[in-house]
Amino acid sequence: MDRISSRKNPKVQALARLMGPARARREAGRFVCEGLRLSLDAVRAGIPVEEVFLTDGFITRHPEAAAELIRAAGAAYAIDEPVAERLGDTRTPQGVFALCRMGEAFPPERLLAMDGPILGCECIQDPGNLGGMLRTAAALGFAGAILIGEGADPFSPKALRASMGAAFRLPLGRMDGIDGLFDRCAAGGIPTFAAIPSGGEPVDRLPMRRGVLLIGNEGNGLSERAITGARYRATLPMAGGMESLNATAAATILMWEMTREGREDR
């Protein structure tokens, strides 16, 4: 296993770029997993791992995991601690990084044909919020998620940590705007639910067992087009003088409600 000691090594610089803005990941078709759990999750989910970078300390602390990662990767490199600190997006890097090949986004029509509800994220900006929503969607058995408009990258370091590997297993599609989604849903008879803080139908009165749940931007909520174009507008009743929940909390409750009947049937 070759050793990388310099933080100026081209491979180190390339990894650092991939842990920055989303554009670098899109252009390269690659992303980086940092840490033991995420790296192993990627391997076990069948994500192609091209290279792994491990410190001596990581190999000593986790010999079995290190061996699994080395076997799965196309190439492996030992890195010195200063290199790990240069690359790390966390406060205390564990000393392991996996360079992974990004798969193609699922075509929206394929996602909408799946058996199960779909999460629609319109312009979610915070990667932690997006990752948390994807984690909940995967845990509750959603068929997939569609990322609509400009928003956070699900393969950014922060989003990957928040999703706890859900981005590896939950089918993800992308759309530039909401109109194409409504056209496809109308053609397939698929209901759409716009989550709004007030003025909609209480969620327990809506037929939310199937369809697309639309969650909007943290600050502005859903676009006017998303609200008016959806078949239903869903609101969570608030008590205690509260007007709304944050986007992640609201999404969690609505996703639970959407899958509740299926759990009760089992």
Image: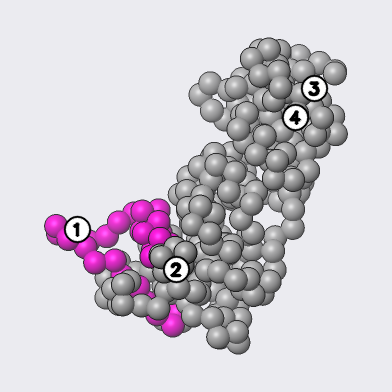
Which of disc 4 and disc 2 is earlier in sequence? 4
Labels 4, 3: front one: 4
x%, y% of residue 104?
A: 74, 58
**Residue 2: image location, x then y, percent:** 85, 18
The magenta-colored residue range is 230-259
Q: CA distance from mark 4 to mark 3?
A: 11 Å
Earlier residue among tags 2 and 1: 1
> In the figure, residue 11 lies in which quadrant?
top right
Label 2 close to label 4 by CB (< 8 Å): no
Q: Which of the 4 image quarters holds residue 52?
A: top right
Q: Which mark is residue 265?
A: 2
User: Compared with residue 67, is residue 138 higher up or lower down, i.e. above or below?
Assistant: below
User: Where does label 1 land, which residue?
Assistant: 242
Instruction: Name the outermost residue toward the front.
Output: 266
Q: Is residue 16 left or right of residue 214?
A: right
Q: Which kind of residue does numbered mark 2 sit on?
A: Asp
Mark 3: which amino acid?
Answer: Tyr
- Image disc number at residue 77: 3
Q: Is residue 253 magenta?
A: yes
Number of numbered callouts drawn: 4
Give the residue number, with chain letter if any, for mark 4: 69
Taking the magenta stretch, the answer to whether it contains residue 207 is: no
**The N terminus lies in which quarter of the figure?**
top right
